[in-house]
Amino acid sequence: MNRRSTWPLRAVAAALVLAVVGLPSATAGAQGAPGEEAATTVVESPSPNTVTAYGAAVDHGPSSPMDLAAPLVAMAGHPSGKGYWLAASDGGVFSFGDAAFLGSAGAIDLAEPIVGMAATPSGGGYWLVAADGGVFSFGEAAFLGSMGATPLNRPVVGMAATPSGDGYWLVASDGGIFAFGDARFRGSMGATPLNRPVVGMAATPRGDGYWLVASDGGIFAFEAPFHGSMGDKPIDRGVVGLAASPDGDGYWLAAEDGQVYAFGVLERGSAAEADDAKSEARTVAIAASPGGDGYWLAHGAFPV
């Protein structure tokens, strides 16, 4: 069932608790246990509207580029690791492997495009969030509130769910955080000038903290361990998303050229082209496999 509401905000962005960027950080690349080697994969020139898999993550499709009415913008992995969902900016949802299709916002006249999604812990539901903070819930995912009727300083760019599935956070491009259900507000960057906009977030395994990532690769950690960032290092293309390891001991950043930067975890491969030729595909999202030994990248198309 598609639902959208103007329920009151349960928690809003408040004072900064902790922000870490530009500190001495781990270098991008493999950072696993001593003696452990990463099983890496390099996929050159991925096609638009496809998914590429790395490490132990299994490719569940699509087997060929999808013909879509709107670009892909978000991805969520199924908790089993045997499937995932993709979301397009028009609210369309596409399911692969064990991930069941439970509905979409594709037939809804959206005020603003979809920008993010998150799955419930059991995989029996998912949420979509639009740039205006409107939330759409499907399957067992409960609607717990939204920012859809509240003026925002900057658009929402992503979301993350709590481990219980009884709450979620929304994050705006200025680093503002909006918490609903059992999601606790741990701080934000909403009152702090940023070098580049925030583009995504990830929650800690226990749900007692979260990380934000900016397009320059800067990481802001709130009640979550800081493992390093790209905020003080040159990158070819902007970062588009963040995925945390299941144990919270690290995270991966994905850039729009398909490059992956690993901190506290092993890099398992990337879709960056070795010859630096311009790809037709733009990486739009990253999702970690539940075992922490792989991840998926979702690829859309560059704006024409």
Image: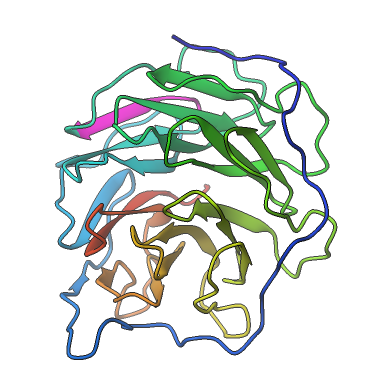
The quadrant in which the N terminus is found is: top left
Position in image of residue 110 (x %, y %):
60, 19
Q: Answer above or below: position of 223 versus 183.
A: below
Q: Position of residue 91 (x, y in %)?
A: 47, 25
Q: Quadrant of residue 31?
A: bottom left
Q: Is residue 135 above or below residue 286?
A: above
Between residues 161 and 174, which one lies in front from this camera angle?
161
Total marks drawn? 0
Q: Is residue 27 left or right of residue 113?
A: left
User: Where's residue 46, x and y in %?
Assistant: 27, 58
Quarter occupied by residue 147: top right
Quarter location, residue 266: bottom left
Q: Residue at point 34% right, 50% down?
A: 298
Q: Which residues are magenta?
A: 90-96
Query: Can residue 139 be seen by looking at this rendering?
Result: yes
Residue 43 in magenta? no
Could you tell me which residue is drawn at 17 percent across and 90 percent down?
Answer: 35
Locate residue 243 relative to residue 12 in the image: left or right: left
Q: Is 217 or 12 nearer to us in this picture?
A: 12
- Please tell me whether residue 93 belongs to the stretch shown in magenta: yes
* Residue occupying image coordinates x 20% and y 46%: 81
In this view, the residue farthest toward the top is 1
Residue 22 versus residue 45 in the image, above or below: below
